[in-house]
């Protein structure tokens, strides 16, 4: 006797909220693509960057500011090689401009092997190994494979991007998670209890919002003691980012709670004797969960960009910690742009992550209301 | 102590002088500049096994009164005496003032008083299954035991006309009438003695209304329930209620046996209401009493009797002194200075 | 009042809504007419198609609905003349000049709540005057201005005159101190007052017909009584036809001379009001009348409720759409054959196999 829902199939299908959300989400191709991209990126950059990168983070070479070695399949004689290869680098000195640069020497051919031996490391921080995704499988220092060139200390840029990605991507995620925690809790309390608590939290968020960002970051970052270990600094920075940004989420959550609080099903639960924590966790917060997820997802790129910007300005992470922001700092001189433009290879990766998050977030937001009201 | 009325009968709920004022806050510092007197010194009682209808137009405070009794809103003043079995160690009955109980005690008493809400869409949590919704009161009171309770819930669902396989479905898969039934099943899950029905059929189609009203009457008989039936549809209220009370801008103006109130009203507002109801009978010649003006403002009510600006019988005393709610005829209460003199027309 | 002069003739109207899961036949073969000066009631529960029919009369069926069959004819007559022009409304351009003249100026409409600010009925290109005619009051402009603009859109008067007319209309619908109220904003008025303003607007353009779709459902009984009185009074003074749509049997018993009963997009019965209430023919009408509580002496009789539930509009029963719930169901007939519209003696029509030779 029950009315058939619009998407009824012949056998009874779970009509729970989350299954409806998933069903609607699946139909959005762009969002699925975004999600897959993010999964791949997080796996590659956070879980196994040491495997994918051919070199260790700090491994220097004599090939400073060398241009990228192009991966080729056809050599200068027109012969096709099954196995990709690169040309070796040789020094070239320009006496007039007084610059030293490295160009490819077509006479030296180094083949690229997969799953080769390279610099040792610990996979996932636990398993010692020295396998890398690709490399020249040679101990000869001249057998280099710098597919995105090198920086001023001769370090492989591609490898550094891989390692840098770990910090950049994680800070976005962890920072957003902390923001979520802080924002939802305070927002929920503020919205639910109202009164003085609400007023205090409101004024606090307004105060923080009115405070100019950069000076605030600078002040807080400068307050980090210099003798702290890089990891400690990293976590402190994450906390700072979360602390400055929770206000927006708290406001949203507060608004949601305010509107849900007066719904009749909440009153019903109250009338049966539900206490505050039950109302909060069983009725109110689940109602805000979907909104929170969307807001959080769409805010992560902002957080990643914040860290990037801060580190680029020198206010955030500093070497030896490497993030994309730190990497970009090395690329920010005119000299670099003119003579070593490959140092900007960080940017496309950044853009891909941001786009992927936005596509995912948009898809989530559309799937949020699976009953088809909008 | 309790307002007996002249008829005998066990009083289950006795409300005396109930007030609920909502503060009006303005300005940056949220200063209180006045009060909306949603419920303003209301007294009535409900006998065991009967249905008391509570009627009035919008803003009269009937919904607020129902919610204040159950302490969804904290009463500003007054007493809500309820004959409870939950607060004595041996389960014997004792009158307690719900307005005075602490949180723990009130929670126990909530097993005995349940509520049914108006909006079929919003009164059920869309993220919970029907089974979870109906089980919630049991869970809240720690009475949920896996196999037995599920059997109870299935039985309840069948009693209200739903099927066992509806247990795992979600509210949006049901029609408005069915959702109301789920709400009714939920209200009955702890075997209450008093059920406050807050406009339970107002949002339903005419034919579904009939089904739901019949269901409520059957359940009342089977479960020995007492109802407070809050509604604005006068025909529905008369049909289901044994006694009816009329409210206007937070005040109770008349209370009597259902047929008596509709046929022989003693208050001019009741008379006007009765004449305003459209009768489903084309042969009925309407002699409407039209009340001029709009309903009084509960944050700024007129002096004396709140109804006097719209009352066609008003005399000077009506604008000076607020009338007392008194028992004029056996079991017939009214708040009007001129009640003895007026000869009013019923339906 | 009844000069047997047809004003609007709906012929076999069919309106369908194309939703993702299928096609819903919101209106399936509605056929009735409204004469000049007559009050016709249309009664039915949710999903019966009464509101969609009303919208179709003004060529305002909301998307994704569209008229898929039949037509609505409007017998237009300029004031004072005897020449009648027949206009097929369903064929008109929904944004065209002609239908805009008709809407509000010749056929007016009022709805349930005049200020639902969330979903305005008008699109960006509509004039305010039209929006107001289409029963929505805009929250950000004064009431008087909105009324005056509507009046100016349909009558040839100056701005000052339009304002005068607006004040006079407010007075006639019983708004106290209309000279002051004319400058207030919609949210400063109560629900009942707003509804009265909308009636004022609808009537200030002196239309030939007013379509009232649940005009008093959201209002208190005492306000409802006032509004119904105003409507009747104004109708008499200008000989306006009213199509009164509601689910409230009490209201329709009072207002309508003739009633059409609809169920799931089909019309099932039509009769004079007294005949419908005292001699209903269709089982649905009978069941409906028996299911409402009557005010007065308590009889203690249980309400006779209609069995079952309204069917899923995407999966309508075969044959007669009402048969699964019908107390007079005839197996083999009602589930196989769809009844047709039959005339019974005394201006009484019904669509039911009980009255049909099969």
Image: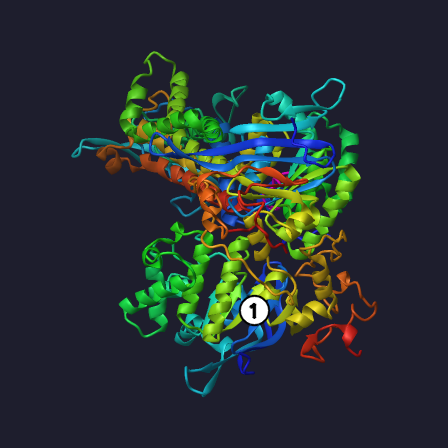
Q: Image height check: is B58 above or below A111? A: below
Depth order, front residue of A205/A110: A205
The image shows residue B231, relative to residue C112, as above or below, that is above
> Considering the image in quadrants, where does the C terminus of chain B appear?
bottom right
Chain letter, disc 1 residue: C
Residue A63 falls left or right of residue A239: left
Q: Residue placed at 67% from the left, 26% from the top?
A: B109
Expressed as whole percent of the image width and height from the top left, the position of residue A93 reads 23, 32
Q: Label 1: which residue? A: C53
Tell me which segment is drawn in magenta.
B119-128
Image point 55% across, 51% down: which residue? A372
The one nearer the camera, B253 or B170, is B253
Q: Is residue B126 magenta?
A: yes
Residue A66 at least partly seen = yes
Percent of width and height locating residue B154: 77, 39
Q: Main secondary structure of the magenta part?
A: loop
Q: Residues within 10 Å of mark 1 (few under 14, many from 20)?
A: many
Counting from the top left corner in percent of width and height, residue C274 is at: 66, 71
């Amino acid at each position: 006797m029950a009315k058939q829902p619009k998407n009824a199939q012949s056998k009874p299908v779970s009509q729970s909220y989350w299954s409806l959300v998933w069903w609607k989400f699946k139909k959005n191709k762009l969002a699925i693509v975004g999600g897959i991209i993010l999964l791949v990126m997080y796996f590659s950059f956070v879980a196994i960057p040491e495997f994918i990168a051919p070199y260790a983070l700090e491994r220097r070479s004599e090939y400073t500011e060398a241009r990228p070695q192009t991966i080729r399949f056809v050599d200068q004689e027109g012969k096709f090689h099954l196995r990709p290869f690169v040309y070796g680098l040789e020094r070239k000195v320009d006496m007039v401009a007084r610059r030293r640069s490295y160009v490819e020497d077509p006479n030296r051919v180094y083949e690229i092997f997969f799953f080769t031996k390279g610099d040792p490391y610990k996979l996932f921080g636990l398993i010692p190994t020295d396998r890398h995704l690709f490399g020249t499988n040679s101990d000869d220092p001249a057998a280099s494979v710098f597919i995105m060139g090198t920086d001023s200390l001769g370090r492989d840029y591609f490898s550094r991007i891989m390692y840098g990605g770990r910090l950049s991507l994680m800070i976005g995620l962890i920072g957003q998670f902390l923001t979520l925690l802080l924002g939802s809790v305070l927002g929920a309390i503020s919205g639910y209890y109202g009164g003085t608590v609400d007023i205090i939290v409101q004024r606090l968020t307004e105060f923080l919002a009115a405070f100019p960002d950069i000076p605030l970051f600078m002040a807080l970052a400068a307050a980090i003691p210099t003798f702290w270990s890089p990891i400690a600094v990293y976590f402190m920075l994450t906390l700072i980012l979360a602390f400055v940004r929770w206000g927006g989420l708290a406001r949203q959550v507060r608004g949601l709670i305010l509107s849900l609080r007066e719904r009749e099903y909440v009153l019903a639960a109250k009338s049966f004797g539900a206490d505050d924590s039950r109302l909060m966790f069983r009725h109110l917060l689940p109602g805000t969960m979907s909104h929170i997820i969307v807001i959080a997802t769409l805010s992560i790129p902002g957080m990643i960009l914040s860290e990037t910007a801060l580190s680029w300005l020198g206010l955030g992470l500093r070497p030896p910690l490497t993030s994309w922001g730190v990497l970009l700092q090395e690329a920010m001189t005119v000299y670099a742009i003119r003579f070593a433009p490959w140092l900007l290879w960080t940017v496309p990766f950044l853009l891909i992550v941001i786009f992927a998050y936005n596509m995912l977030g948009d898809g989530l937001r559309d799937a949020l209301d699976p009953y088809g009201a909008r | 102590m309790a307002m007996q009325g002249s008829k005998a009968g066990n009083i289950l709920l006795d409300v005396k002088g109930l007030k609920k004022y909502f503060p009006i806050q303005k300005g940056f510092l949220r200063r209180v500049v006045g009060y909306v007197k949603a419920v303003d010194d209301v007294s009535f009682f409900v006998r065991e096994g009967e249905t008391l209808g509570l009627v009035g137009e919008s803003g009269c405070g009937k919904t607020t009164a129902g919610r204040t009794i159950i302490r969804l809103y904290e009463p500003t003043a007054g007493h809500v005496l309820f004959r409870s079995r939950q607060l004595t160690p041996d389960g014997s009955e004792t009158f307690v003032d719900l307005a005075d109980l602490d949180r723990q005690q009130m929670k126990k008493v909530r097993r005995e008083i349940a509520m049914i809400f108006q909006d079929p869409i919003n009164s059920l949590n869309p993220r919970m299954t029907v089974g979870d919704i109906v089980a919630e009161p049991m869970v809240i009171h720690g009475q949920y035991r896996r196999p037995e309770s599920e059997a109870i819930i299935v039985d309840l669902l069948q009693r209200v006309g739903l099927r066992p396989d509806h247990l795992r479905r979600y509210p949006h898969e049901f029609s408005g009438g069915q959702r109301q039934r789920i709400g009714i099943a939920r209200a009955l899950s702890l075997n209450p003695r008093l059920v406050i029905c807050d406009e339970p059929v107002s949002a339903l189609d005419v034919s579904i209304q009939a089904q739901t009203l019949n269901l409520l009457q059957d359940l009342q008989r089977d479960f020995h329930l007492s109802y407070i039936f809050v509604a604005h549809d006068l025909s529905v209220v008369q049909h289901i209620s044994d006694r009816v009370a009329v409210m206007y801008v937070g005040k109770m103006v008349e209370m009597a046996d259902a047929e008596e109130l509709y046929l022989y009203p003693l208050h001019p507002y009741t008379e006007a209401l009765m004449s305003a109801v459209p009768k489903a009978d084309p042969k009925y010649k309407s002699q409407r009493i039209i009340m001029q003006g709009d309903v009084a403002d509960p944050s700024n009510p007129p002096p004396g009797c709140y109804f006097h600006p719209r009352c066609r019988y008003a005399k000077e005393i009506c604008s000076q002194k607020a009338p007392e709610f008194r028992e004029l005829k056996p079991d017939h209460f009214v708040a009007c200075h001129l009640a003895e003199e007026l000869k009013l027309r019923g339906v | 009042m009844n000069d047997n002069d047809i004003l609007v003739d709906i012929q076999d109207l069919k309106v369908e809504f194309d939703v993702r899961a299928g096609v819903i036949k919101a209106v399936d073969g509605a056929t009735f007419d409204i004469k000049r000066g007559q009050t016709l009631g249309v009664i039915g529960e949710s999903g019966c198609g009464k509101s969609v029919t009303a919208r179709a009369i003004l060529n305002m069926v909301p998307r994704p609905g569209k008229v898929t069959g039949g037509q609505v004819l409007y017998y237009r007559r300029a004031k004072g003349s005897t020449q009648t022009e027949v206009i097929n409304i369903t064929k008109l351009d929904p944004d065209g000049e002609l239908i805009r003249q008709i809407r509000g100026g010749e056929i007016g409409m009022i709805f349930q709540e005049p200020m639902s600010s969330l979903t305005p009925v008008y699109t960006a290109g509509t004039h305010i005057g039209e929006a107001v005619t289409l029963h929505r009051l805009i929250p950000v402009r004064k009431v008087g201005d909105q009324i005056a603009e509507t009046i100016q859109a349909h009558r040839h008067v100056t701005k000052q005159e339009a304002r005068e007319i607006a004040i006079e209309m407010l007075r006639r619908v019983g708004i106290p101190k209309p000279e002051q109220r004319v400058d207030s904003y919609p949210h400063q008025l109560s629900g009942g007052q707003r509804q009265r303003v909308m009636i004022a607007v609808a009537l200030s353009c002196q239309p030939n017909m007013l379509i009232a779709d649940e005009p008093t459902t959201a209002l208190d009984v005492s306000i409802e009584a006032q509004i119904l009185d105003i409507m009747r009074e104004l109708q008499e003074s200008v000989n306006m036809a009213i199509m009164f749509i509601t689910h409230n049997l009490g209201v329709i018993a009072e207002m309508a001379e003739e009633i059409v009963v609809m169920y799931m997009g089909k019309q099932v019965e039509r009769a004079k009001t007294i005949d419908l209430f005292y001699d209903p023919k269709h089982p649905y009408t009978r069941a409906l009348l028996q299911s409402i509580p009557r005010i007065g002496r308590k009889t203690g009789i249980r309400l006779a409720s209609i069995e079952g539930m309204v069917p899923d509009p995407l999966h309508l029963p075969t044959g007669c759409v009402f048969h699964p719930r019908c107390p007079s169901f005839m197996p083999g007939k009602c589930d196989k054959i769809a009844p047709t519209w039959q005339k019974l003696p005394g201006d009484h029509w019904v669509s039911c196999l009980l009255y049909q030779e099969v």
